[in-house]
Amino acid sequence: MPAKKLITSDQLEKVATAIFNGGAVRVFDVYSENNCTIQKYDDAEMVLYKLFSDLTEPRHYSFLGIRYDDFGADVETERIELNPEKFPKASFRHRCSGWGMITFHVEAVEDGVLEAVFNANSFKRAQALELTLPALGPVNAWNWHRVDSQTRRLTRVLAKLEKSRK
């Protein structure tokens, strides 16, 4: 798993822009809000708004999924039924997953400082888990060269931002 990088909240615009500079892309919540469907974000401005909204109280973190059109396969959306004893005001939520989906997790760690990481499965890891999660489809349907390339590109963006923060 790539190392988490420390960036400032002022640098989030560069991260959102970098996501959309990689080609045709879909950005979406990995988990929906309770009783809602997955939200999708069509441009860097929408992603930035989502990130700033999530990073304020009470949440302090955001978890987004990224899938570029040249990845081949697609993500799957699953409805999760919630336990009414634990969630009396909610009955369901949705989760997105996919063997080659890139995730972006960012968390506020102190005033104006964020811990951020882009992550994706490797082909080898996905292959090892393929039989345990058949709903995600065949691992070979993903363009692993592009998944790896985009994940590395986005990770480099975070690394450069971390260096310029200091």
Image (cartoon, rainbow, N blue to C red):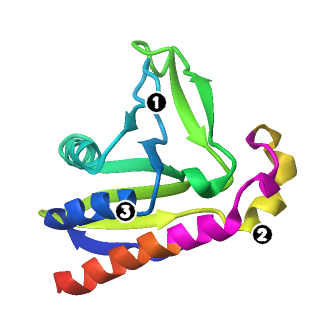
- Residue type, numbered disc 3: Asn
Query: Residue 4 location in percent, x, y?
Result: 40, 73
**Mark 2 or 1 closer to N-term?**
1
Q: For marks 3 and 2, give the CA distance.
A: 27 Å
Mark 1 surroundings: few (<14), some (14-19) or many (≥20) residues within 10 A:
some
Q: Is residue 130 left or right of residue 30?
A: right
Q: Is residue 12 left or right of residue 148?
A: left
Q: Quadrant of the C terminus?
A: bottom left
Residue 77 vs 36, above or below: the answer is: below
Asked whether residue 109 is in view, the answer is no
User: Which residue bears the numbered disc 3?
Assistant: 21
| Residue 20 found in image quarter | bottom left
In the image, is residue 122 part of the stretch drawn in magenta? no
User: Which residue bears the numbered disc 1?
Assistant: 38
**Mark 3 or 2 closer to N-term?**
3
Query: Residue 121 location in percent, x, y?
Result: 65, 63
Tag nearer the camera, 3 or 2: 3
Q: Residue at x 34, y 74 (%)?
A: 158
Residue 35 vs 60, above or below: the answer is: above
Query: Residue 128 location in percent, x, y?
Result: 83, 62
User: Which residue bears the numbered disc 2?
Assistant: 124
Q: For marks 2 and 1, give the CA distance.
A: 28 Å
- Residue type, numbered disc 1: Ile
Query: Residue 56 location in percent, x, y?
Result: 18, 45
Q: Residue at x 17, y 62 (%)?
A: 9
**Mark 1 or 3 closer to N-term?**
3
What segment is highlighted magenta in the picture? 136-151
- Residue type, numbered disc 2: Lys
